[in-house]
Image (cartoon, rainbow, N blue to C red):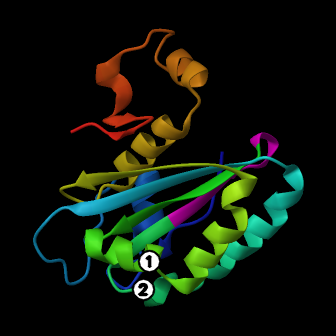
Amino acid sequence: MLRSRWCQGPAGDSQGDRAASNGVDSPMRGRRGGPLIVSVTDFTSDAYRDLPGIARRGLALRRRWPHLDGAVGMWLWVEPWARRCGSVSVWTGRRALTQFVRLPEHVAIMNEYRERGTTRSLIREYESFDAARILRDAEAWLMPDDRHRAARGGRHDRAADNGFSAHGPRF
């Protein structure tokens, strides 16, 4: 999986990439009480020819990130050989995520590509920002079941699911 660098939002700080690589928690600016919301999206395109357009639109939307209220930060990811792409985004709350999902640019991307592939997504709450844990959990959920089982020694251990399932998070 290829992953972009951390893109900081106005509610985050610039330590996302360093935190992700060092396993260090990253503080956030102006943080109020309540859990953080992490959204993970996974789009599998029906055709390779759609990937360049999806990537361009995703990168254009990413440029708005530093100006989105409630955005802590995000990573984009892609597996071009599997026709898959998506994001891992961190928000101060569900309201901020909902406002992003309703942005005209996001709605336009979804409308254009919705019928050209399969979309999966999940939302999970975290009590604190731990970039390494968020990425580890997201990558485990994004990994196909056979690769996920192999990474865990070939068995299916529900406790090792990191709280993620095909139908969303388990709490």
**Mark pair 2, 1: CA separation:** 8 Å
Disc 1 marks a residue whose amino acid type is: Phe
Percent across and percent down for residue 111 are 65, 69
Residue 138 drawn above or below residue 149 = below
* Residue at 50% from the left image edge and 41% from the top image edge: 139
Pointers 2 and 1 in contact (C-beta within 8 Å): yes
Q: Which residue is mark 1?
A: 100
Is residue 13 visible in the rendered image? The answer is no
Q: Which residue is mark 2?
A: 68
Q: Residue furthest left?
A: 33
In the rendered image, the quadrant that contains the C terminus is: top left
* Residue at 18% from the left image edge and 77% from the top image edge: 31
Q: Residue furthest right?
A: 49
Q: Which-is-in-front pick, marks 2 and 1?
A: 1
In terms of image quadrants, where is residue 94? bottom left
Q: Earlier in the sequence, mark 2 or mark 1?
A: 2
Percent across and percent down for residue 18 are 44, 63
Q: Is residue 113 magenta?
A: no
Q: Callout 2: helix, strand or loop?
A: loop
Is residue 167 visible in the rendered image? The answer is yes
Q: Residues within 10 Å of mark 2 (few under 14, many from 20)?
A: some
Residue 110 drawn above or below residue 14 = above
Left or right: 137, with 159 as reference point: right
Q: Callout 1: helix, strand or loop?
A: helix
- Magenta residues span 75-82
Left or right: 108, with 156 as reference point: right
Disc 2 marks a residue whose amino acid type is: Leu
Percent across and percent down for residue 155 are 45, 9
Left or right: 30, with 53 as reference point: left
* Residue at 32% from the left image edge and 80% from the top image edge: 70
Q: In terms of secondary structure, what is the magenta stretch mainly?
A: strand
